Amino acid sequence: MSAPEASSLLRAPGPLDGTGIGAYREYLSSTRGLEFDDYQDMWRWSVAEPEAFWASIWDHFGVGGSYERVLGSSTMPGARWFPGARLNYAEHMLGTEADTDSPAIIARSQTRDPRELTYGELRDRVGRARAGLVRLGVQEGDRVVGYLPHVPETIVAFLAAASLGAVWAACAPEFGARSVVDRLAQVEPTVLLAVASYRYGNSDIDQRDELARIREGLPTVRHVVGLDYGPHPVPDAMTWDELLAAPGPLSFEQVPFDHPLYVLFSSGTTGLPKAIVHGHGGILLEHLRLFGLHFDTRPGDRTLWFTTTAWAMWNITISVLLHRGAVVLLDGNPLWPDLEAQWRLAAETGVALLGASPGYLTACRKEGVVPPRWPELRQLGTTGAPLPPEAFDWVYEHLGPDVILNPFSGGTDVCSGFVGGGTWQPVYRGEMSGPGLGHDVAAFDEDGNSVVGELGELVVRAPLPSMPVGFWNDPDGERYREAYFDTYPGIWRHGDWVRFTERGSCVITGRSDATLNRGGVRLGTAEFYDVVEDMPEVADSLVVHLEDDAGGSGELLLFVALAPGAELDDGLRARIAAELRRNLSPRHVPDLIAAVPAVPRTLTGKKLERPIKQVLRGRPVEEVLSPDAVSGADAVPAFRDAYRATR
């Protein structure tokens, strides 16, 4: 697929008056004598002078306190940020007395009635939960974990733990026991907060048996706190009300910059998931930058981004509180009772930033959804997978020219985005606007040379504050180095294929570990999906390339999950092949097109391209993935059987 031309500009950079990045630009001018003509000019300075840039983020957003210097060591891995600093992320999340009556959390759930908390109420509950954790013996460095839904109590518990310097980790209640134990047992928690049931759409989900198995698998847990949620209480547990029974002082342990804040987990399709440790200071600065300069969050703004507590977007979106915005929570089935439900909630609550998955936007487009417009909406964010160009057209057709469509990409690894957009950046059809401020990203070829206009590995050439402190139980850092630094010494390789344009925008085409190398030409999987899933007969798809060990072109295999009523006959196969040939190239025409009942995904929605490839190579399914760690695992044998039928 050729790169879009300059004529595909959908939105020019907007005026900066009243915006976060406009205020930051004025700050740099008045305090440092720096003047910037455009975003690219500011970005170049931010990566050329990283210490000056991150010091300005610290000062502009009022972090306070002192430090010895910005960057004690710039070596990757091993960079040391703000040595000597002491702070606490939770302190910056909870506001002051001046914010007491402002909304902080607006919660909607399919399990119970709506709930809302002001900053004053949030501060009170965090203080009470903190006091409750102290009564349970929680101290700095202890691990407090949750088996919890996306509800206000989860945010309260996390901030209470963080205020003590304890370390947080969580799994969503739709996870099975094995997946939860594989993750949470690694950090040896002392306190578990949990639910035993919830409602998903119009279905009651009973997780009492799973919770019992989880408790058996976490032998270090000394106390269980049960949240009254759904029809079934947590047995043999302290109640949430008991934890919050007594008020307590809202104080914050001042911890080093890299003190662990929370542990996030990789997808873990096979083996134990990576336990990625993020620090107080790195997350604080990165999220101040992300929401203040790119998502343009202002005091009083409301943000809705559907997520679960198992996805890094939970950790990211709640950080709107750093800018005194309000986070809108949606717990349950995001597609119930219909595709329009998220749009209605966003309009009803007047969100300024709405986040949606590419799959959701594509489904809305295919189903002819006409979303409402509301005056507060300034940005529509999207992440998790590439957004097809047609979805850009649909968004601007229905939401109008003033909304900023902001696809961004990063990951659990940095709990943020490397590339994305914002007020001062243009929006081009089918592209991400460009690298984020302070993020020195590029595309590298196999020899480690920076390339523009062609696919390369997405790399980060300089350290970032929110890069992991390390992996849990990785004392010598070997697993951490292998994960990101084994290809280009001293350079972070993220594992995505990316193409940067001459104007600075970029297109991510898929994971580099799922690369399709067809006749010596590297192809990204995302461009396949853009074409195939735009066909009305196809609901979902997955493509893999099986290389020929003898040096031949190998086999390109396309598996499709069909829309209701569709049939994969020779005519549909021919139309799929023709669409791929016309829109992409003859190299993109598969050797096999087969139907499967569903496309399996990780629990955060990523297609299992690499595990399916391993199964097709002959590895047993049970060695390749853990059923509890994926959705649609029952469909995996169908891929193997469809391929074998052609042999």
Image (cartoon, grey):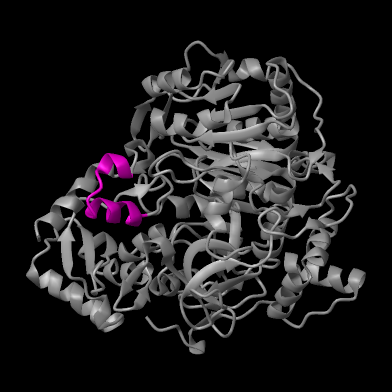
Residue 405: x and y in percent read 53, 68
The quarter of the displayed image where residue 387 is located = bottom left
Instruction: Tell which of 408 and 542 is nearer to you.
Output: 542
Instruction: Tell which of 142 and 9 is nearer to you.
Output: 142
Does residue 266 lie above or below 243 as drawn? below
Q: Which residues are magenta?
A: 607-624
Asked whether, in this view, residue 168 is left or right of residue 62, the answer is left
Does residue 369 lie above or below 255 as drawn? below
Asked whether, in this view, residue 19 is left or right of residue 451, the answer is right
Classify the position of the N terminus by image quarter. Answer: bottom left
Does residue 189 lie above or below 602 as drawn? above
Residue 588: x and y in percent read 27, 76
Specify whether residue 169 is painted magenta: no
Residue 141: x and y in percent read 70, 30
Instruction: Tell which of 385 and 460 is nearer to you.
Output: 460
Q: What residue sits 28% from the left and 39% below the top? A: 622
Does residue 575 lie above or below 493 as drawn? below
Asked if one can make out residue 324 in the rendered structure from this viewpoint, the answer is: no
Q: What residue sits 53% from the left and 53% below the top? A: 482
Instruction: Tell which of 31 and 563 is nearer to you.
Output: 31
The quarter of the displayed image where residue 556 is located = bottom left
Q: What residue sits 32% from the left and 67% below the top? A: 529
Classify the position of the C terminus by image quarter. Answer: bottom left
State how many labels appear: 0
**Could you tell me what secondary structure mostly forms the magenta stretch?**
helix
